[in-house]
Amino acid sequence: MERLLKDALVTRLMRELRQRGSWCGETHIQKANYFLQELFEVPLDFRYTLYWYGPFSFDLRDELTAMRADGLIQIEPVDPRFGPRLKPTDKAEKVQELFPRSMAKYGPLLEFVANKVDTKNVAELERFATGLFVTRKLGQEASVESRKDKLMRVKPHVKDKSAIGAIQDVDSIIREAQALMLEQAQAQKPKSAPFP
Amino acid sequence: MTKHNHEFRDPVHVFVRLDTDERRVVDSRSFQRLRDIHQLAMTYLVYPGATHRRFEHSLGVMELATRVYNVVTDPRNLKDYNNTFSEIVSDRKRLDWLSVLRMAALLHDIGHLPFSHAAEKELLPEGWTHETLTKELILSTPIRQELEKMDLQAEKVVKIALGPEAATDFEFSPWETILAEIIVGDAFGVDRMDYLLRDSLHTGVAYGRFDHYRLIDTMRILKVPPPSPGSGEEDKSGDFSETSIPEPSFALGVEEGGLQSSEAMMLARYFMFSQMYFHPIRRIYDIHLKDFLAEMLDGGRFSTDTEKHLSITDAEILAKLHEAARDVRSKGHLHAKRIIDREHFKMLYERNPDDQKANTEAGKAVYEALCDKFGADKFRHDSYRQKGGPPNYPVQMRDDSIVSSLAISEVLKHLPLVSVDYIFADREVFPAAEAWLKKNRKDIIKPILKEAENGKAT
């Protein structure tokens, strides 16, 4: 995917998050993009590895800094006790306007992800994103129990009950995401022509 | 009498000391090769003093890593975290990890190609970087055997040398993440500290200096402030239930008294990048070198075979470069001549705020228009935007609270970012291209709709 389109999608996702009251710090943006990429196979091409609070992409971290250099996003340090928030600028809106088709195509997916992330706290995001990471590694056909065990191995502070809950949430959201993709594919299918 | 402690004199750190086991690693072929790899590629063509090599930089990184480690693992500085890391609960364990760290620091650059970063991305096969080569070399038999003599595991050394960003096939414990941060960390990595100080000294660009003594003295391992409210600091129900607490994260930070020296380091970085590392003439020499290597090397790429890697340094490339510059039949003759005879392309366009305001990709638009008009072989485009995260690290205040650096530092809040967009032109077309660009620039940089509302992308 070309860089400018990627920037348009990331900044639009940030806008959706902020509209829903999300803190929209780097952790929220990292996880939201991970969901977008993994649940809907949006080709953002960010490589993720397990790091702070679950899946983390150093590529995306670099891209966020590059977007700041280009004036597409700004840092908003609001409270010394917490990490900074990030805000898309008016210039980011202009970049989004260059891609009307992609914005229309990916818009419902961005909204879906934003609805799932919105006001979740970091602990919830960490469990859920790591649950998805583990599911991607072991396959969705792997049992809830085995995926829960793996999640607890990589995040030992997560307790049994929360880990099972996270894996179950992952399965349920994957199903919802698949249904949304099917709906989109059907809507895009050309109407069959009547017999001549 | 056999000597067990050795020292190198160093222009930055005065002495770098090491023991006999470590000296054997320094004497290894992989490490000695760094004597022939320039730290700053062909920067010496612009800043004549920049002839220093990766060899002394690597020694410097080992020295600084040791100083940082000794400060941050001092029980008086760990305070509440004395029992947090089982890895350093005894003096013996603390010293064992110091050995791992010192070897990781020493070996972190052994995978560098000739002329360092100048041509890495384009001249290695997909998926390979100098870090991948570093990993291969540390895991190779000669280095592994030296490490085993010191009771060190090569895999651990790789992890700490490269960090989680480059060593993606390894899992890191929180302690290993901190050790890697000491070397390659985005905020206070000693790799960066050493290159800023050393490059500044050798190039004569004074902006790279900062008070690293004060900075290191105030460095601490600190709990990272939570990314947002509701992350364990508080809970909707008012208690600290397990469901609201994410994994505790630790990172290198500073005491409040070290804030100014940390700001000075961030500013030093900004000035060194904008003034020296991204000096346009330095950059175009890198590009000509890359063009030369792409033509000269078999298959246009460096080999990833460790034996072949060890056999090629700046010395071999320089010999080829001089030979090619004098022989019109040699591969890469034109590019070699541009370097040796100082006939480099001239800068025709650079990123500026007005054009940026109109079009985020103004440089790309100008480059494509020039290529269309005059031919692609007459121009080179060099574009870079700063990488890494924001300067956000924990700061321990005098009342022991820990806050985000960005929230309390006006300097860090307004720290500029480095981004460049240069277009260089062959001297042959430079006057015509310059005149044409002056006349057409406004039209060229107009942003264009990338996609039609309905239908294909434009």
Image (spheres, grey):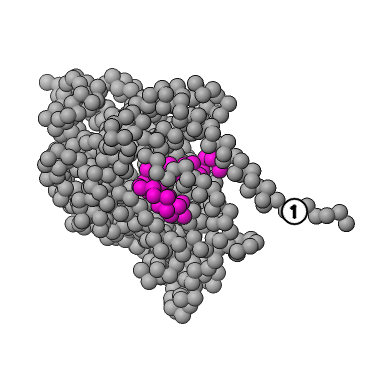
Q: Residue furthest right?
A: A196
Pick the residue in front: B340 or A10: A10
Q: Residue at x 40, y 35 (%)?
A: A124
**Between residues B396 and B284, which one lies in front from this camera angle?**
B396
Quadrant location of the C terminus of chain B? Answer: bottom right
Residue visible at 53% across and 37% down in the picture: A173
Q: Chain of mark 1?
A: A
Corner quadrant of residue B241: top left
Residue B349 in sight? no
Label 1: how many Cα within 10 Å (few below 14, some 14–19, many 20+):
few
Q: Position of residue A92 (x, y in %)?
A: 43, 60
Q: Is residue B274 above or below residue A160?
A: below
Q: Which residues are magenta?
A: A12-40
- What's the residue type where badge 1 is placed? Lys
> Which residue reaches farthest front?
B237
The magenta stretch spans residue A38: yes
Give the answer, above or below, for where B188 lies relative to B458: above
- Residue A146 in the magenta stretch? The answer is no
For disc 1, the marked residue is A191
> How many numbered discs, if any?
1
The residue drawn where x is 17% and y is 21% is B91
- In this picture, residue B249 sits left or right of residue A172: left
Quick check: B46 left or right of B343?
left
Q: Does dot 1 land on a helix, a strand or a loop?
A: loop
Picture coordinates of residue B35, whole percent (x, y): 29, 41
The residue lying toward the viewer, choosing from B37 and B367, is B367
Q: Position of residue B278 (x, y in %)?
A: 33, 58
Q: Position of residue B245 (x, y in %)?
A: 32, 32
